[in-house]
Amino acid sequence: MNNLSVDKKLLYGELRKVGISNFLESNMLGEVYFMLSLKCNLRCKVCAWWGKSGPCRNKAFLRKYPPVLTTKELMRFAREILSYNPHRVTFSGGEPLFNKKWYYLAKFFKENAVKVSLTTNGVFLLKEFERVTKVVDEINLSLGGPPSILSVIRDNRRQHFKDIMQGLIKLSSFKRNNNNRPSLRILYTISSLSYKHMHELVEFMEDNDIAIDRYHFQHLMFIDEPTFKKQKEVFSKEFNVARCDLWRGYTFPPLNLDFDFFKKEIGKLYKLNNVSFSPDLKAQELESYYRFNRGALGYNRYCTAPWHQIDIMPNGDIYTCHDLFIGNLREENFKDIWNGEISRKLRFRLTRKLFPGCKGCFYHYSERSR
């Protein structure tokens, strides 16, 4: 993605498909991410939030985003965004099950026919089992690898996997008696620590008869240090953003892996019918992506996220692009935020040119044709 120019024809075509004709505004929402707490009980080393370069390691950052939203404020906001017909709401974090308010929001959206998704590390799945199975349509279980490498990928190690497995065993039994609901998807972050163990995790889950609907392998979304500096410069100059704490969490050095082994491992997974990758890199692209940090060059150059996706921080700040906050739900009505000055400026910018950091962002590759 050295060329940051936008493919306007494809971008405008995608926006028209969902009924957007004024390209500076949006009258819809696709996915809403609620991060009600940044607190997490695990320390996965490549986590963009709690990993070694993640912002949550900084106490000053956590003090900026305390979980201060009241249930009343959250419910008011939930009612506001219903008119934008969100396709899905996802509760994530941190570990979302730390904050009990998630359940009341989820129940509200479930009652209003909005799909509810939960992204969790699974440690509290057994403890919160009744609530989860009552309102959640889709569980995304974030696992960095099979138990054989947990001591490598996490600071707090094997003791949590027993709790996770107990929850998965109970969930699998529940699914078999309830039309395979809720769906269960494994989110596996590929990194230098885990890329040799992807198929091992699939085999482990099958051997333990865990009812996994899909394995979604996420290539490490990262930018290198020079790209991070360029991203900071652009945000400072164009949007007066003083800090890029969130982007810092996605900053890793390029990796020189055993690419022959990597290709074989991915080849084995492609033979399975319940496996997907993001981005969907071909074997010949792996070295360019990891060793030289060139991004997934085969993907179309545009991003639609600022027209359909939002993330809500624990203090009510809303962003659709890392570190670029478009408003706060405690201070403004959503309609004024969603098509306000910053939102419009961001959309205008992305009709002309991508950001340097886009090559390390999930939203650029999500549900994207090549």
Image (spheres, helix red, strand yellow):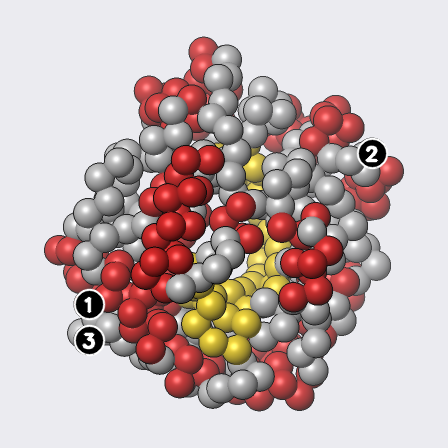
Q: Across the whole image, how many numbered discs are drawn on residues? A: 3
Residue 30 placement, left or right of 243 = left
Residue 234 placement, left or right of 21 = right
Q: Quadrant of residue 370?
A: top left
Place of residue 205 in the rendered image (x, y in percent of width and height, measured from the top left)? 68, 34
Element under label 3?
loop
194 vs 247: above or below: above
Residue depicted at x 32% and y 65%: 346
Q: Is residue 2 visible?
A: yes
Q: Which of pointers 1 and 3 indicates the residue nearer the eye?
A: 3
Place of residue 278 in the rendered image (x, y in percent of width and height, measured from the top left)? 43, 40
Sequence order check, earlier mark of 1 and 3: 1
Residue depicted at x 45% and y 15%: 259
Residue receiving disc 3:
22
Q: Mark 1 Cα within 10 Å, few/some/many (few <14, many 20+)?
A: few
Q: In the rendering, which numbered label is found on residue 16?
A: 1
Q: Quadrant of the N terminus?
A: top left
Q: Mark 2 to mark 3: distance in Å? A: 52 Å
Place of residue 243 in the rendered image (x, y in percent of width and height, measured from the top left)? 51, 56
Residue depicted at x 33% and y 20%: 284
Say which of 51 and 156 sits in front.
51
Q: In the rendering, which numbered label is found on residue 158?
A: 2
Residue extending furthest right? 159
Q: Amino acid at mark 1?
A: Arg
Residue depicted at x 39% and y 39%: 227
Element under label 2?
loop
Q: Quadrant of residue 135?
A: bottom right
Q: Mark 3 Cα within 10 Å, few/some/many (few <14, many 20+)?
A: few
